[in-house]
Image: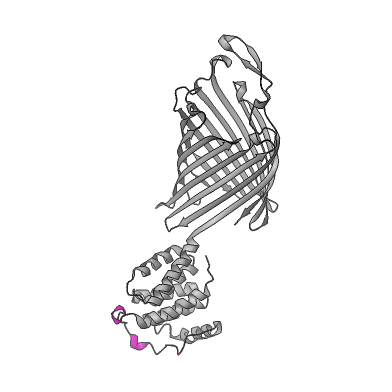
Amino acid sequence: MKLNSPNLLLHSLLLGLLLVLTLPAQAQQPEEKANTCPNWQPNQLPTSQAQWQAEYQRLKPLFNTCLHSADFLAYYGAIQLRTGKANLALDTLERALLLNPNHGAAQLDYTQALLHTGDPYAAQALNKQLQKQADLPPLVRQQVKLNQKQLNQLLNSFSHQLSLSTGYDNNLNTNPNLSIITLTPQGNKVELPNPAENQARQGATLRLGATTRYTQRQATSQQSLQLAINSRLSENNQDNQHQLTTSYQHHNQLINGNQLKHQLTLLGLNHGGSHIYTSLEAQQQWLTTNGNTCQLSPSHSLSYQHFPNYNNLNALEYRLTPEASCQLNRHQIKLSASGLYNHALNTSRPGSHRHGLELTASWQYPLGKGSLAVQGRQIHWQDHQGYNPLQSNNARRTIKRQQLALVYLLPLSPSLQLSSQASWQQQTSNLELFEFKSHQLELGLRWYF
């Protein structure tokens, strides 16, 4: 991590020298062998890069002689920092602080050196210590506050994404394409016409999406808050969909280098102008970062599912998901398997409780100037009781669904991507009302900022 902040650095140097002169005498510890270090103080501070370089060359021969002078090391480390030698400055300023841990100039510039060498968390900790010192001169305290503001901008950030795509969907309402419905009252077979509004509808689509994310980073943890809005508009308003998702994530860095992620997600879905679904999910996931080719990331989650217009469908669902991801040369592969149990909260829910299994596999590979991703999913679940006496003689409903998506992303600029996607899904069941097929084609843009 490399920062370019010459103005802040120059202020730091000036204020650091001021601090040397203004700190109380008792804060300055006696320096051993100070008489061996000749007079090195400048007549005036350099005002150009060439003068800083000249000052560095002037003091370089005195370095070994003045190793026991905290004031010299603080000033010399500041010069090294100003002339682009951040790693050398880090070592020099550490020496100064070993001689005098309360040396304000060295502390102030050491914060900047940590930033320039890619350790903002240590810089943050040191700057917080400086903020707690009650005897700092007002100008120095102001510089410490500016440093803290710079650290906050670096470690706490917002990111945004906007997406726009257009395409075609041959089953906007995921309904079966049945003109006749077969019922089995008391074991008898009865065929009834299926109204057109309950059959599959097709049409062009326009998708709009917006996501904003705030991330706060610390040395051993990270937390973020995300808000996403996604809408699908179609020719028929009754097939319009709007989804609002908000989530909070917290990552803890564990002693062995792995991470433990906690996530809370609230989702709301509106279809055709009506609020049809809300869920609240809590998830915990173990993220391994051991550097191996393949890594395991098991997780489990508990969600509450609420259907405002059909309260008898409300449920609690628990999922246990072992997951593995592998990086093989340029191939990125991810596999997961979820076992789920869905507990009906109302005894009148058709089919009562259900259990199931979900398998997911994805593959990503750089192709041309972009990247190609393929994802497949297989879902299988079954009710614990018969679904409806009028359908298949009250058989327990079984659902099998296959999904396949192909996505290609092509960067047009560092912040703009062209996206194209083709997806297909098919659901089969022992109850014909729950069978459907659909495919979608989309082309759009994604903008990151």
Residue drawn where x is 59% and y is 21% of the image: 431
Question: How many numbered discs?
Answer: 0
* Magenta-colored stretch includes residue 30: yes
What kind of secondary structure does the magenta stretch mostly adopt? loop
Q: Residue furthest left?
A: 26
Asked whether the viewer can see residue 119, the reply is no
Could you tell me residue 213's position as x and y percent? 52, 52
| Residue 341 in sight from this viewpoint | yes
Q: Nearer the viewer, residue 270 or 108?
A: 270
Tell me which segment is drawn in magenta.
23-45
| Residue 274 point in image, percent of width and height | 57, 35
Residue 73, percent across and down? Answer: 41, 80
Residue name at image x 41 percent, y 77 percent: 139
Q: Nearer the viewer, residue 369 or 185?
A: 185
Residue closer to the observer: 120 or 342: 342
| Relative vertical location of residue 131 with respect to residue 349 in this rendering, above or below | below
Q: Is residue 446 left or right of residue 345?
A: right
Residue 34 magenta: yes
- Which image quarter is the C terminus in? bottom right
Q: Quadrant of residue 388?
A: top right
Q: How is the image coloured?
A: one colour
The image quadrant of residue 62 is bottom left
Rendering coords of residue 289 (x, y %): 48, 51
- Residue at 57% x, 50% y is 211
Q: Is residue 128 above or below residue 161?
A: below
Q: Is residue 438 above or below residue 443?
A: above
Q: Is residue 396 above or below residue 412?
A: above
